[in-house]
Amino acid sequence: MLQFRAASAQGGGVLLLSALLAMMVAVLIFALWPELGPQQAWLIIFILLSLAAYVGYSKLTEPDVMLQLDDKGVVFFHKYGQWRLPWQDLMYAQLVEIEGKTLNFVGFRLSSYTEFLAGISLRLALRLLIEQRPLLVAALGAGCKNGQCPTSMLEQLPDFKHNGISYRGVLGLFAQRMDHFRKLLQLDILIPADVVGYAAEDFCRLINQQRLKSLNTKGG
């Protein structure tokens, strides 16, 4: 079993502690010598320190493991839930490209949506819909030809049918988003590729290697 931690989750404790200490010092200085600067400047300082503390806290709430590769498939961990993708449903993983530019995301092409959608929590599906909307917008922009952009993909409906199975509500929206990504990027699911200790290309290559290894083991 292989586990990967997100690089973006590092340094949360140090950032949070530093921001809180800096805020305490700033409050003390403001209480003793408020004339050192205008109130607007003090306000900006406190806002920036509050934002830094929030970012540090957000890093601390990220799961210890972002991705896990085991004998059954890929497991993605998020602070709002997790999903599992069986190896037999994964065709390949590759880096996401938009207009010839490689993004720091790994995309997965699935052979079937059924088992994957049956296991994802509605809470996580809704969060990913929000987080990955900018990627959809970017992909839509890259797909424009002669000024004709498929903007209808931004107007998602809560009812979606795939391979004879109907999905409704949040799950319907998420299944439709997967279908949009497939049409635009030839991929169905996207995750960040910023893991500790691996370049994006190596991370993607390792997923494909583990897929082949697991399928060959089962086949043997």
Image: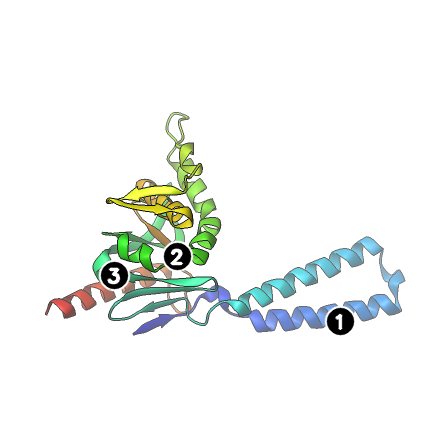
Which residue is labeled 1 in the image? 24
Q: Is residue 124 above or below residue 169?
A: below
Q: Is residue 207 left or right of residue 136?
A: left
Label 3 neighbour load within 10 Å: few <14, some 14-19, many 20+: some
Q: Residue at x 61, y 69 (%)?
A: 15
Asked which secondary structure carries label 2, the reply is strand
Q: Quadrant of residue 38?
A: bottom right
Asked which secondary structure carries label 3, the reply is helix
The amino acid type of the residue labelled 3 equals Asn
Q: Residue at x 41, y 66 (%)?
A: 66
Label 2 neighbour load within 10 Å: few <14, some 14-19, many 20+: some
The amino acid type of the residue labelled 1 equals Met
Residue 100: tell me if it is visible: no
Asked which secondary structure carries label 1, the reply is helix
Separation of marks 1 and 2 at Cα, in angstroms: 37 Å
Q: Earlier in the sequence, mark 1 or mark 2?
A: 1
Separation of marks 2 and 3 at Cα, in angstroms: 15 Å
Which residue is labeled 3 in the image? 208
Q: Position of residue 219 (x, y in %)?
A: 11, 67
Quadrant containing the N terminus in the rendered view: bottom left
Q: Position of residue 218 (x, y in %)?
A: 15, 69
Instruction: Check residue 191 in the rendering and tell me which mark sits there, or answer none.
Output: 2
Q: Position of residue 176 (x, y in %)?
A: 36, 44
Q: Position of residue 209 (x, y in %)?
A: 23, 64
